Image (cartoon, helix red, strand yellow):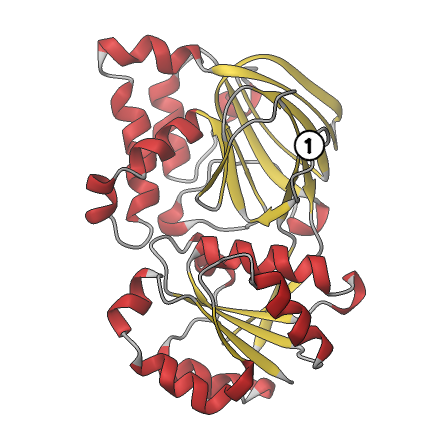
């Protein structure tokens, strides 16, 4: 195992740790310790790691850092020779680490990395978001969505909320802000109206399509979310594709549906109701006027409103 270390100094826990942990990492990894701000140099850095034979990449940051690293890795490493990934949770939101994180932080994590015989792994394939009619570079990520989710993220990203939202509390506040808005008469109609959303996806039940406004759309390559929240009930694991959920505008029985999904439950009435669709697919075409949020990064819709969501390459995530 030839490892490298990617450190985001702007991640929440890394700011608290200061430079002490980074100094230790530099002593261990030497030239393979990279200080990254999730910027344009990341692809260049990944290319250097690939050319020097690095086979394991440790990512010390939150969901946005992991997403940026996976995107850069895919652009450089051959699909059949992807490096192992170890995620050390250090961000404001750590949904990815909650499912496939390394399980340790600090010096203890670094020590365990050099005992590969004691490590297990999970395979996960991220989402790949692209814009067919646009020259934007495709991006990889593990959890995303649009319509009501994008609207809620804008609220959760406000400075006031972020100040009091460490870890995955930011995600809870995102969800709660959506729910709370439904009880305010002034905003209820706007939220329930949703956004324009058309999509088509090949699933185990055949070709599914939707051509109407949507209250909420979510998709993930993960198999677990923090605190028992799991708003999907599509059968099968990540090897079969990614999970997605679509909630139509003005959905029936919404309070009951929210209560169940926040507890990771999907009663039979919810599974069979046409306003709620949860399935798995490897590719879906999307047309929407909504922003799309992937691992906290907000992407504005292109001029033709068309997106493509696909299953990305399979990565091996190490954990203790």
Front one among 219 and 38 = 38
Position in image of residue 133 (x %, y %): 72, 28
Q: How many marks?
A: 1
Q: Residue at x 63, y 66 (%)?
A: 44
SS at circle 1: loop
Q: Residue at x 35, y 61 (%)?
A: 11
Rendered view: 28 above or below 276: below
Position in image of residue 223 (x %, y %): 54, 50
Dot 1 crowding, Cα within 10 Å, few <14, some 14–19, many 20+? some
Position in image of residue 227 (x %, y %): 35, 50
Residue 235 is left or right of residue 269, and the answer is right
Quarter of the view holding residue 46: bottom right
Residue 184 is left or right of residue 168, and the answer is left
Rendered view: 65 above or below 111: above
Front one among 309 and 260 = 309
Rendered view: 54 above or below 142: below
Position in image of residue 216 (x %, y %): 47, 24
Q: Residue at x 70, y 31 (%)?
A: 284
Q: Residue at x 43, y 52 (%)?
A: 95
Image quadrant holding the N terminus, namely bottom right
Residue 155 is left or right of residue 239, and the answer is left
In this figure, which residue is indicated by the disc labeled 1? 134
């Amino acid at each position: 195992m030839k490892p490298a270390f990617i450190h985001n100094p702007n991640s929440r826990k890394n700011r608290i740790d200061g430079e002490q942990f980074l100094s230790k990492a530099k002593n261990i990894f030497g030239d393979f310790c990279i200080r990254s701000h999730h910027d344009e140099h990341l692809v260049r850095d990944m290319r250097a790691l690939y050319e020097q034979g690095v086979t394991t990449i440790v990512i010390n940051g939150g969901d946005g850092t992991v997403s940026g690293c996976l995107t850069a890795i895919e652009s450089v490493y051959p699909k059949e020779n992807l490096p192992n990934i170890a995620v050390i949770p250090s961000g404001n939101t750590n949904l990815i680490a909650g499912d496939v994180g390394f399980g340790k932080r600090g010096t203890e994590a670094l020590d365990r990395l050099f005992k590969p015989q004691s490590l297990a792994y999970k395979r996960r394939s991220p989402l790949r978001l692209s814009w067919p009619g646009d020259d934007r570079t495709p991006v990889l990520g593990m959890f995303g969505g649009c319509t009501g989710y994008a609207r809620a993220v804008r609220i959760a990203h406000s400075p006031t909320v972020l100040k009091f939202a460490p870890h995955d509390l930011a995600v809870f506040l995102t969800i709660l802000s959506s729910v709370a808005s439904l009880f305010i008469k002034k905003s209820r109609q706007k939220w329930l109206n949703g956004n324009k959303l058309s999509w088509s996806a090949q699933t185990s039940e055949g070709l599914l399509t939707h051509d109407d406004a949507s209250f909420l759309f979510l998709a993930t390559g993960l198999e677990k979310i923090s605190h028992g929240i799991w708003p999907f009930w599509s059968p099968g694991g990540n090897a079969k594709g990614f999970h997605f959920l679509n909630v139509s505008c003005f959905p029936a029985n919404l309070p009951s549906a929210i209560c169940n999904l926040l507890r990771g439950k999907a009663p039979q009435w919810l599974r069979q109701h046409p306003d709620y669709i949860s399935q798995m697919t490897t590719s879906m075409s999307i047309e929407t006027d909504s922003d799309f949020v992937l691992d906290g990064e907000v992407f504005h819709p292109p001029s033709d409103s068309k997106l493509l969501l696909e299953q990305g390459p399979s990565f091996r995530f190490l954990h203790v």
